[in-house]
Amino acid sequence: MSELIVFSTLNGLQYGLLLFLLASGLTLIFSMMGVLNFAHASLYMLGAYLGYQISSWLGFWIGLLVAPLLVGALGALIERFGLRHVHRHGHVAELLFTFGLAYLIEEVVVMVWGRIPVSYQVPEILDFPAFTLWATSYPAYRVFMLLVSMAIFLGLLLVLTRSRVGLIVQASLTQPKMVSMLGHNVPMVFMLVFGVGSALAGLAGAIAGPALVTQPNMAVNLVPLLFVVVVLGGLGSLTGALLASLLIGLVQTFAIAGDFSLADMARAIGLSMNVPQVLSELWNVTLAQLAPVLPYLLLVLMLIFRPTGLMGSRES
C-alpha cells in the first residue's frame, strides 16, 4: 500500500505539473486577452515534433531550447497577423479562428512527419533511475520534468508579481487604455504575452515528447482537459491553474491505481447485495474506468458550487 501511495503521488505530481506547464500559457493568454485558445494544445504537439526534429540534428538540449522559441515566435506571428484582426469581430470569431488553426497545425504536422509516432528518445544523461523504492525505480527524466515545471511556475510568479514587466502586463489586463496613455505599446504587450504562452506550450511538448508518445493526436485529448484546468483554477489565475493541475493529476493517477468497483468494496466489508440487472454494469464499473470522467465531474461540481474557480474572482 505504501508503494502504491508513494508512486501514485509522484506520478500524479509529475502529470499535474505537466498539465500546469500547458495551462499556464493558456491562462496567461486568457487573462490578458480574454481568448480561449483552442490551438494551444496543437502548439504543444508542434513543440514536441520540433523538439524531436532538432534533437535528431543537433542534440536534445539544443532541441529543448530552440523548439519553444520557434513555437513562441509562431504564436507571436499568429497574434500579430491573425488574431489581432479577428479580435474586432468578437470572441466567437476568435474561438472559430483558433479552432481552425488547431486543425491546420495538425494537418501540417501529419504532412511533414506522417501519422506514425516518431522515436523521440530520452537523452542518455537522464536515462537512468533516479531512485529505487520497494524494488521499483523512478526515472530521472520524470524528476527532471518535475523540476522544470516548478521552476517555470516560480519564474512566472516572480515576473508577474515582482517585476516592472509584470506590473505592465497586469495593468494592461485591467486598464489597457490607461497603460497606453502612459506610453506603453499595449498591442505589443499582447503579442509578447501570446508568444510567451505559446512558447510555454512548446516547452511542455519538447519536455513531454520523450516521456510520452509523440504522435499527431497527442493534442486531441488534452484540449478539453486544459479548459477544465483553467476553469477549475479560476479564469486568469496562475496559482489556481497550478492547484487545479495538481488536483487533476493526483485524482486521475490515484483513480487509475485504485482498480476496484462498488461491488468489490461491498464484498470487502461483507455486504451481499442483489443489484437490479439494469444497474449491474454500473455496480461493477471500476474506479480506473471512471478516471477519465473525474476531471469533468469536478468541473461540473465547481461550476455549481463555486463558479469563480479555486482562486479566481467573478470580476476577472
Image: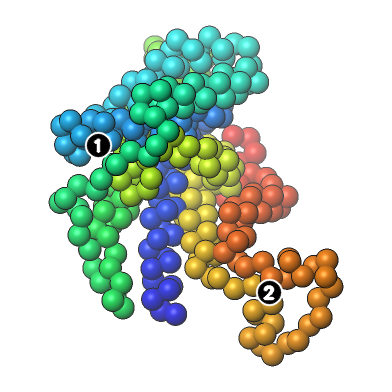
Q: Which residue is mark 2?
A: 262
Q: Which residue is mark 1?
A: 64
> Which of the 4 quarters of the picture holds residue 61?
top left
**Which sits in the foreground, 12 or 85?**
12
Residue 55, image x, y percentages: 21, 35
Residue 253 in view of the camera: yes
Residue beneath the point at 28% across and 34% down:
51
Residue beneath the point at 58% across and 47% down:
232
Compared to residue 227, the image places residue 306 above or below, namely below
**Which sits in the foreground, 67 or 247?**
67
Give the amino acid type for the residue marked by disc 1 in the picture. Answer: Leu
Query: Left of 33 or right of it: where is 126?
Result: left
Choose the circle earlier in sequence order: 1 or 2.
1
> Which of the 4 quarters of the picture holds residue 21?
top left
Compared to residue 232, the image places residue 96 above or below, namely above
Determine the secondary structure under disc 1.
helix
Neighbours of disc 2 within 10 Å: few (<14), some (14-19), many (20+): some
Give the amino acid type for the residue marked by disc 2 in the picture. Answer: Leu
Compared to residue 162, the image places residue 251 above or below, namely below
Residue 170 in view of the camera: no
**Which sits in the foreground, 2 or 313?**
2
> Which of the 4 quarters of the picture holds residue 112?
top left
Residue 136, image x, y percentages: 30, 72
**Which sits in the foreground, 70 or 311?**
70
